[in-house]
Structures are given as structure tokens and as C-alpha cells.
Amino acid sequence: MASNKRRRASYVAALAAAGALLLSACGGESTAGGGAGEETAAAGAFPTSGSGEVHVYNWTDYIDTDELKRFTEETGIEVILDTYDSNETLLAKLQAGATGYDVIVPSDYMVAQMIELGLLQDIGVSTFPNGANIKDNLMDAYWDPGRNYSAPWMYGSTGIACNATAEPGCANITSWKEYFTAGLPKMDSLKDQVEVVSAALRATGVAADDLCTTDKAKYLAAQELLNGFKPAVIESDGGIERVVAGTSNVRHAWNGSTHRMKVEVPGVEYIYPSEGLNLWADNLAVPVGAPNLDNAKIFINWMMDPKAAGKQSNFSGYDNGIKGSDEFMDEALKTDPAVVVPADKVALLSSTPNCSEDARALYTEVFTSWQDSQ
Amino acid sequence: MTAVTTPTKKPVTRARPGQSSPKLAYLPIIFLAFAIGIPLLIIVVYSFLEKPSQGTGVKWVFTTENYRALFIQEKLDGTTAFDTRYIKVLWTSFYYSLITTVVTLVFSVPVAMWIATREARKRTLLVALVTLPFWISILIRTYGMRQIIADEGPIGKFLGLFDISWSILYSPPATILGLIYVFLPFMILPIYASAERFDFRLAEAAYDLGAKRMTVVRRIILPSIRPGVISGVALVFIPALGSFLQSDMLGGGKTNMVANVIANNFGQARNWPFGSALAVLLIILTLLFVLIIQGIAQRRGDKVELV
């Protein structure tokens, strides 16, 4: 538990630091520029171009395809993109023996789990030409200390998106408990066992550092709360489209996707539930058996460039783990309280629980039980 | 031309018209045996194995727990209780399929009869039109349906002009609508095939002999197209029971139908043995319905063979 707390503290610090970086960038100070120079210096050992393909398996709607074209122009490598909707789906696919993917995008706890299961390759990310661009606090991430297996991608939080114009009833929601018991029409849930069950645990009074408890009574309470929760949609994909189209008004949502909803639907707000919310960090990694290992490394290194990372942030609406990328980020991101955590909300964030096998089994049990009783 | 240079007659070796070597059938039979038999065997075997602690895959330990778990739930407080969730899911699948079958049947009979009574050239065109949806991927058609029935879609916008609220997407009616939409041609075509062979002079003769309109339909027309109706019912009801896409895309991604629960167990939930047990149960129920439909067909003396 102690390590869990430390982890959480350093993690929150990462976010606060990122916020500070964003603020300094607003002031016109430029911290970038070093990245490009280093790249040319180290380019001798590390290939920067190649041929053939790189097969990227990413979350749905989570990569700027214009940038992929730029990648192809600069490196000569064609990107083949496939998508999934949750860490568990990714794990299920890899465990079932899926091969052919070169780059995958697991979140923090899933990186730890995949390393444990021997599913990821040690590619020495920190020694990459752009390895020095990793933000300091994400360099020593608990799931990959020193960054051997994974490079940082986007990071953000998971809270609640509310279109108060279309559904005034959600404007009063301040907590997970109110969200789960609101009983509003057009509610929309993530299809993600860790997010849904941890939110339900928080709603029933489980503290942030106890989210990996194996006390069944606590899961039972969460299950009872979820029994009364019947959203219209349980789907992680397509949330932005549904909110924009008006088929969903209240959604368990990631902050970046909420930012994108806000851009299109001005009435949308991002709610930081009072019981606290998960802070997650996604990563680029290479699965064992990747057919194009060199291309995967080139791809990951390319994405660790400040400009590439900044462009990806502009597309997906999340902050990223690359130093100097803020220079390339849109003003709209830097001023959105969904993206830059307001000072009074920072304490609410804690890292997504990385639980033991026993606790994970309880998460699965509560989640599928809820899903199957819809 | 070669016949001129080889005058020797070998009439015995030539197969009679309509006959060919049975060897030609071996390859497809072997293919089907492997493509159906082996996955089926795997599913049955997996359904009697344990789930590994890491999820995904199987642990080679025999258990009947997966079948028990279909009906009995081990609750988190340590108690066990009769579990109605999967019975409900099966019932929902059955119920959606039944509605789909009835609605497509009611729609299809008049359409099939109408096409069958057109002149030959028009018939060809009309049948081609019925098969038109097959030219487009079912996934794209279902996406299309989602756009059309969305709250802000054309129907919703039109009804909005009259202040009528429209919101059926991500609800059971949307799933059923999707099923009807996809399965309608599978009902029309076999009924049309039966209706096309029907000699409509028989209906005229019945009229001439004084039969009333409904009597002609009931006593002359319906019995003649019954084989088509039975085929249509089988072609719609049975695949509808196991359909996945409509409930997934139009029903809000919830595990409403049994195929969605099975898919979820092989995906996110990573419980292959339980998914297999549910799949075996679905196979048994499907087989049961096939036998029932075939039983009805046989009793009526219609030539409909399903198994």
C-alpha cells in the first residue's frame, strides 16, 4: 500500500508538473528545440527510416491519421491501423495468440500486467534518440521503471461528461454516487471493467489507496449500487459521436474525449467526481513476436518527438508525456479545465489501480455480473 | 474435331447427364467436416474445463462448473442463488427472433405473391432488387440503419417538425428493427420460390367454382407456398437466435442477446470455458428448433429438409 501511495503521489506530481509546463508555455517560454538536435546526434545508431509496414493496434479514435501520413512521408514506412476498445480486449487478443501487431497502446496497469505475463519486448526505450524527451515524472513510472518496455503516449483522467444544455439533470451531479443513481435517460457508460468497478467502489466509500482490496463485502456494496444503474449505452467507442449527435447526454468519459465533445457541443462540462477519479497514462509498447521490430522502434521514436506528440494531443484532447510538446499544442487544450486540472481538483486524482490477480478477478466478476443483468 | 481422329466408341465411360463422380464431393465434405466439426469439438471440450487464473484460454482440469454457473450464481457474500440472468438473455434472444420471424413473414407473403404474379421479365428484376442488400456489407447496412433511426436522424428530424419525440436507438425496438431489416430478404426469397411454381390458374378455378376470397387464400394459395414459408421461418428464426451485430450496434453495446454474452466472454471478460458452455447451450437449443420446424414440415408432408 505504501508503494501505491508513493506511486500516486509522484503521478499527481507528474500531472501538476505538466500543468505548470502548460502554463509556462502560455507565457511564451519555449522549452523545446533540444529534441531535434539530439535526434540528429544519435541518428547514427538508430534507424530513422525503413521500408514496409508497421502494424499499430490502438484504442479507437486515438491517433491523428494525418500525422500517420507525415510519418509515412518521412520514414517510408506504411502504417496499418487496427483498433480496440479496452485494455482487457487488447489483453484478450494478445493472450489468445494474436500476432502481427508491432505497436500496441496499453495503459499503466496493463503494461505492468503484460510485462508480468511476458507479453512485451524490452526495447530499451530510454536509449532511443528521443528517449530524453520523456517527462521526468513519467520516466520512472511504476509500470516500467527507467522506461525499457514502453514510451509514454497520452495521459489523462476518467470522469463524467455532462451535456447540461440537453440534460439539465446532470448539471447537479458532483459525485460517482449521484452519477450511478441519477437514473437519467440517455446515460452512457464505458465498457471497461477497471473504470466502472473502481468508480462504483469509490462511490460506496472505498478510499483511493484501497481500490485493490480483496474484501468481498466492499465489492458486494459496489455491485448493489451498480444493480440499479441501467445506462442506455454501454460502449467505450463512439462516445464523442453519440454526445454530438444527441443520443447520449451523460457519459462516463475520459477527459480528452470530453474536451473534444466540448469543442463541438458548447454545453458539455467535465465533472470531477468528489470521491476521486482515476488518472491513467497510456504507453506505446511492442508485443513479443512483432513482425516488424525495427519499424516499431522507428515509429515509437518518431512519436516521442515534441512536435509529433503535440499534434497527437491536439487530435485526441489529452496531454502527453513528451517534454516540449506543449509548444505545438493548441491554445484550446491549454485553457480547458478538463485537460489542465484545476488546482482544487488535483487532490482528487489517483492512479488507476494496479491490482493483484485476486482483486482483478473480483473486478471481472462485478463487471460481467452487471453487464449480463442489463 | 478430335472425334474424327479417334473413331473408337467408349460409351460406357461417359457419365449419364446429371451424374458425376462422387469424388468431386469429397473435398467440400472434408472441408465442412473440419470447418464445423473441429471448432464444435473445441467448444464442447472447453466448456468442461476450468478458467485459468489469468483469464483467456483454458486450464486442463475437468469441471462441470461452467454449466452450473449458467443457472446458479455464487454471490460475493458466499451464498448461492438461482440465477435467472442467462435464462433471461436466452429468452430475450428467443423473443426478438420470434418477433423478427412473425414480422418478416407478414411482410414477405404479399411481396412474394406480388412478385410471383408479375410477368417473367419483371420478376427477374424484382428478385434482383430483393437481393440488392446483399451487395452491401451487413456492417455498413447496420451503420446506415443506425444513422437513419438516430434521434437526430431523418426520422427524428421529420417527426420533430410535429413536436413528436423520437428516441428508439439503443433500445430493444432498435435491435428488433435491425433484425427485421437484415432478415427480410431471407423470408421473401424462399416464399417467392414456392409462389413462382404455383399455378395461378388453380386460384382462378377456385374463384370460378364459387370460393370466397379468403377461402382461396387459405385453402389454395397458403398450402402451396407452405414449403417456402417453412424454409423462410427456418432461415430467419435460427440465424436470428444467434445474431450479434444488431444488438451490439443498435442495442447500445449491452449484452442483450446470447451471442453478445458469448462474445463478451471470449473478449473482455476472458472466460472462455463459460462462453463455451453458453455456446453449447445455444447450439442445443438451436438444434431443438431445427428439429421442431422439420417435424412440422414432415407432418405436413412438405419437402423441407433442414438437417
Image (spheres, rainbow, N blue to C red):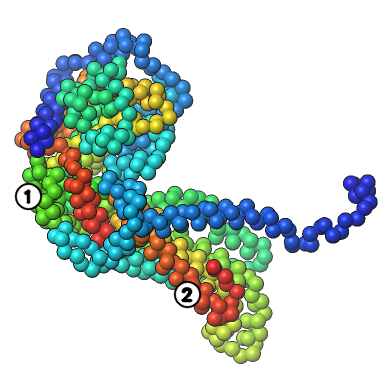
Circle 1 Cα neighbour tier, 10 Å, few/some/many (<14 / 14–19 / ≥20) = some
Give, as a three-letter code, the residue at label 1. Gly
Q: Residue at x 16, y 16 (%)?
A: A29
In this image, A180 relative to B34: left or right? left
Report x, y in % for residue A89: 32, 44
Q: Secondary structure at mark 2?
A: helix
Q: Residue furthest top?
A: A41
Q: How far apart are the two marked residues, 2 and 1, measured between alpha carbons? A: 53 Å
Residue A194, picture quadrant:
top left
Report x, y in % for residue B126: 59, 61
Q: Chain of mark 2?
A: B
Q: Residue at x 41, y 37 (%)?
A: A99
Q: Which residue is mark 1?
A: A205
Circle 2 Cα neighbour tier, 10 Å, few/some/many (<14 / 14–19 / ≥20) = few
In this image, A159 relative to B21: left or right? left
Report x, y in % for residue A163: 19, 47
The label shown at residue B292 is 2
Q: Residue at x 29, y 64 (%)?
A: B68
Judge whether residue B225 can be spotted in this image. no
Q: Residue at x 32, y 11 (%)?
A: A42
Q: Nearer the viewer, residue B243 or A329?
A: B243
Q: Nearer the viewer, residue A291 or A180?
A: A291
Q: Residue furthest bottom?
A: B210
Q: Chain of mark 1?
A: A
Q: Secondary structure at mark 1?
A: loop
Give, as a three-letter code, the residue at label 2. Ile
